[in-house]
């Protein structure tokens, strides 16, 4: 396939940026330098043969081409406009020309191609892996997986060579900095549960947030962290940055965000999450927050929670609050220590205090009425007003809510003893169930918990 005009200009501008003089420029100056060079190369390539694609015929088209070059060099090319659209919640790509966007109202639309070929899409991702993040990440047949935090906080996950075509999934967090009060106002919990969770954080109780994929675990973890005293030192540990507690907020002035590192091209330099959890114990952290427990890091995390890092938190995938204990046990038995179930349960009982489980559902709301009406405009245009009817109509906004809360009590052999103090009600939202232990209530009251918000019979006053 012949080289497109945009690709040719991008390649030349990239060479210009690699020159010694340009390498010393700051970020803004580099972008302006790249813009000027793009126009220069556009003039020089205007009469070139072998380029695929029409030449721009107006100043507006020239500006659009220059912006496409900048997006390819500093962003995600044609994909960037979708990532920047705050109305889009998820983007799924099954090859360069099969692109699906899921909007906040639940509608799902097929968008235009984000690259001219699958090879160009892979090159785009490889370039992003080299530019974004703390260290360069590989994306090739030897390492066909990529996890990356994009500017703005969106999370990108991509695979190649294990599927017929490269596949990309991007998740945007619509609510990046919510508090428990705001989540309460949005219907994720009620006043009694908000009071309990806020007091549990302030009382330095260890908390696991569980739920299925896209149930709001990261959002709740951020909201819980907002209750931490600003004087405390926090260390967060993630496979790929997503929490963002160290950016865009003044809530946590003393914190360090750690990110796992894959092996380099020689197969060396890998630093897994488990090693970072162990390292955090030497970093004078008041609290350790693990973004997501996915494997053998579960044991050092539990050890950290039970060895002076009280008030620590993490998230984990599970189908129910009770299923969290089975999931932890399955990770523990696969760890190098091969910890048996009884020992794992003793560790859980000594480390965890609360499990908070989330659920979600599609809920018809007023936002559904914002679905665009058909038009004669190109349906690949990502602007809201110009989009045609959705291939899959709006189902309403996804509502995420707390469904269950368990207080961990003890361990007896192969069982972790816990009380489900909030259980799923008729609408699957958490309602008061078993009472907290008297000593727990006494301690939480000292940190602001108001048990009067829950009536003796288990319903709210």
Image: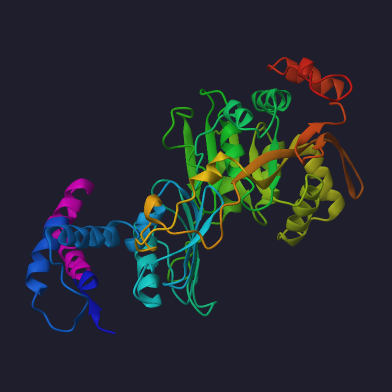
Percent coordinates x, y for residue 233 in the rendering:
52, 30
Snapshot colouring: rainbow
Q: What predominant SS class does the magenta segment belong to?
A: helix
Q: Quick check: 18 above or below 279?
A: below
Percent position (x, y) of residue 347?
79, 44
In the displayed image of the protein, which residue is found farthest to the right? 413
Query: From the viewer's perspective, is 330 left or right of 227?
Result: right
**Residue at image coords 76%, 54%:** 327
In the image, 53 versus 48, the foreground residue is 53
Rendered view: 247 above or below 269: above
Q: Nearer the viewer, residue 280 or 30?
A: 30
Percent position (x, y) of residue 284? 54, 33
For the C terminus, the image quarter is: top right
Q: Is residue 14 magenta?
A: yes
**Residue 82, x across and y down, in percent:** 40, 56
Q: Quadrant of residue 410?
A: top right
In the depicted view, which residue is nearer to us: 15 or 36? 36
Which segment did they paint magenta?
Answer: 9-34
For residue 90, above or below residue 229? below
The question of residue 425 being in magenta is answered with no
Residue at 92% across, 47% down? 413
Horizontal relation, residue 183 to residue 453: left or right: left
Q: Is residue 341 above or below residue 43?
A: above
Q: Is residue 434 left or right of residue 378?
A: right
- For this rendering, which residue is in front, 389 or 333? 389
Seen in the image, is 315 located left or right of residue 441? left
Specify the quadrant of the image occupied by residue 357: top right
- Which of the 4 image quadrants contains residue 199? top right
Residue at 39%, 58% in the rendered image: 375
Residue 133 appears in view: no
């Amino acid at each position: 396939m012949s080289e497109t005009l945009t690709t040719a200009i991008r390649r030349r501008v990239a060479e210009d940026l690699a020159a010694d003089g340009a390498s010393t420029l700051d970020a803004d100056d580099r972008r302006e330098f790249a813009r000027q060079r793009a126009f220069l190369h556009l003039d020089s390539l205007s009469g070139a043969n072998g380029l695929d694609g029409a030449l721009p015929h107006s100043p507006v088209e020239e500006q659009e081409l220059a912006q496409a070059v900048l997006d390819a060099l500093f962003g995600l090319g044609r994909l960037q406009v979708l990532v920047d659209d705050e109305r889009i919640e998820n983007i799924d790509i099954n090859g360069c020309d099969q692109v699906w966007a899921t909007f906040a109202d639940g509608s799902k639309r097929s968008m235009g191609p984000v690259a001219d070929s699958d090879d160009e899409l892979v090159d785009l991702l490889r370039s992003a892996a080299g530019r974004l993040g703390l260290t360069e990440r590989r994306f090739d047949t030897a390492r066909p997986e990529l996890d990356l935090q994009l500017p703005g906080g969106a999370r990108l996950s991509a695979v190649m060579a294990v599927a017929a075509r490269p596949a990309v999934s991007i998740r945007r967090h619509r609510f990046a900095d919510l508090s428990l009060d705001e989540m309460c106002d949005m219907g994720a919990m009620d006043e009694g549960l908000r009071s309990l969770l806020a007091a549990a954080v302030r009382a330095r109780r260890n908390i696991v947030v569980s739920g299925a994929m896209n149930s709001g675990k990261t959002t709740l973890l951020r909201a819980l962290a907002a209750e931490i005293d600003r004087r405390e030192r926090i260390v967060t540990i993630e496979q790929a940055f997503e929490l963002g507690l160290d950016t865009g907020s003044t809530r946590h002035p003393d914190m360090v965000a750690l990110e796992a590192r894959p092996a380099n091209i020689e197969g060396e330099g890998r630093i897994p999450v488990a090693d970072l959890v162990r390292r955090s114990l030497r970093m004078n952290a008041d609290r350790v927050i693990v973004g997501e427990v996915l494997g053998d890091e579960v044991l050092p995390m539990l050890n950290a929670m039970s060895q002076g890092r009280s008030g620590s938190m993490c998230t984990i995938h599970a189908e129910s609050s009770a299923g969290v204990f089975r999931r932890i046990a399955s990770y523990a038995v696969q760890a190098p220590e091969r910890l048996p179930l009884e020992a794992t349960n003793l560790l859980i009982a000594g480390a965890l205090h609360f499990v908070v489980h989330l659920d979600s559902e599609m809920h018809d709301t007023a936002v559904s009425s914002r679905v665009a009406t058909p038009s004669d405009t190109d349906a690949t245009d990502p602007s809201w007003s110009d989009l045609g009817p959705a291939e899959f109509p709006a189902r309403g906004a996804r509502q995420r809510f707390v469904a269950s809360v368990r207080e961990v009590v003890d361990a007896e052999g192969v069982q972790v003893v816990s009380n489900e103090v909030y259980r799923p009600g008729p609408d699957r939202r958490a309602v008061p169930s078993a009472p907290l232990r008297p000593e727990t209530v006494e301690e939480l009251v000292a940190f602001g918990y108001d048990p009067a918000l829950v009536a003796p019979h288990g319903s709210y006053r």
